[in-house]
């Protein structure tokens, strides 16, 4: 029986490369000389540092430009709040999304069930497996998911015929 998996997984190697390139650019730019502007990646969290909110926004802009250049969707980034560190310094933690949350997977499952397509959706951990009798039904389900769930950078893999 044909099936595919709906997943939300970033290319972590490209994310790491983009963070390193952004850190290199921050180190060489004249307007960041002598400031605490920096960013670092630990596990799946990117921490941005700056002297003020404006500088933090500049660091974030550099990061998003580097991510876009490496074909990493910026919808993978889940921005946290800006926190005061000490003195006039600020930091922001950005989480890199990986996997579909339970709420979003239930939304995908409900969407497929309400579509009247002859396919079934099953939640399997942080992915949603869609199975059906015909390949055309699965492709229609992919198009439906792409159209209606625009806030998540979903991809489809493990297509079996």
Image (cartoon, grey):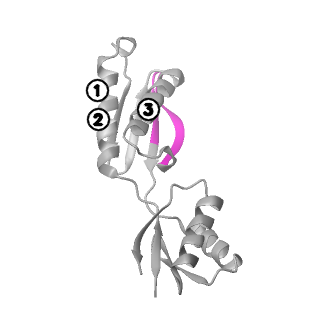
What residue is shown with label 3? Answer: 65
Label 1 vs label 3: CA separation?
A: 13 Å
Q: Are marks 2 and 3 in contact (CB under 8 Å)?
A: no
Quadrant, the C terminus:
bottom left
Q: Residue at x 41, y 59 (%)?
A: 9
- Foreground of the two, 77 or 117: 117
Q: Nearer the viewer, residue 86 or 10?
A: 10
Residue under pointer 1: 24
Please give the residue where the numbered disc 2 appears in the rendered image: 20
Residue 87 % position (x, y): 45, 22
Name the foreground residue: 19 vs 50.
Answer: 19
- Please indicate, yes or no, whether residue 85 appears anywhere in the rendered image: no
Q: For the magenta stretch, what is the residue range?
A: 77-93
Q: Is residue 124 above or below residue 53?
A: below
Q: Residues within 10 Å of mark 1 (few under 14, many from 20)?
A: few
What secondary structure is found at the residue carrying circle 1?
A: helix
Nearer the camera: disc 2 or disc 3: 3
Marks 2 and 1: in contact by CB < 8 Å? yes
Secondary structure mostly seen in the magenta stretch? strand
For marks 1 and 3, give the one nearer the viewer: 3
- Judging from the image, what secondary structure is the residue with disc 3 in? helix
Task: Decide if residue 13 is on the left or right side of residue 102.
Answer: left
Q: Residue at x 33, y 37 (%)?
A: 19
Q: Quadrant of residue 139?
A: bottom right
Comes first in the chain, label 2 or label 3: 2
Q: Residue at x 40, y 54 (%)?
A: 10
Let me know if residue 45 appears in the view: yes
């Amino acid at each position: 029986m044909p099936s595919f998996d709906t997943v939300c997984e970033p290319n972590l190697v490209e994310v790491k490369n983009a963070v390193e390139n952004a850190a290199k650019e921050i180190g060489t730019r004249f307007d960041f000389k002598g400031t605490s502007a920096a960013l670092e990646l630990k596990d799946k969290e990117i921490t941005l540092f700056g002297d003020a909110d404006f500088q933090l926004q500049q660091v974030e802009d550099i990061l998003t430009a580097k991510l876009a250049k490496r074909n990493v969707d910026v919808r993978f980034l889940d921005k946290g709040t800006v926190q005061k560190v000490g003195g006039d310094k600020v930091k922001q933690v950005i989480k890199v999304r990986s996997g579909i949350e339970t709420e979003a997977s239930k939304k995908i499952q409900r969407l497929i069930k309400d579509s009247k397509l002859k396919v079934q959706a099953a939640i399997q951990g942080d992915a949603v497996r869609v199975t059906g009798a015909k390949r055309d039904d699965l492709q229609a389900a992919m198009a439906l998911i792409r159209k209606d769930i625009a806030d998540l950078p979903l991809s489809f893999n493990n297509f079996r015929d």
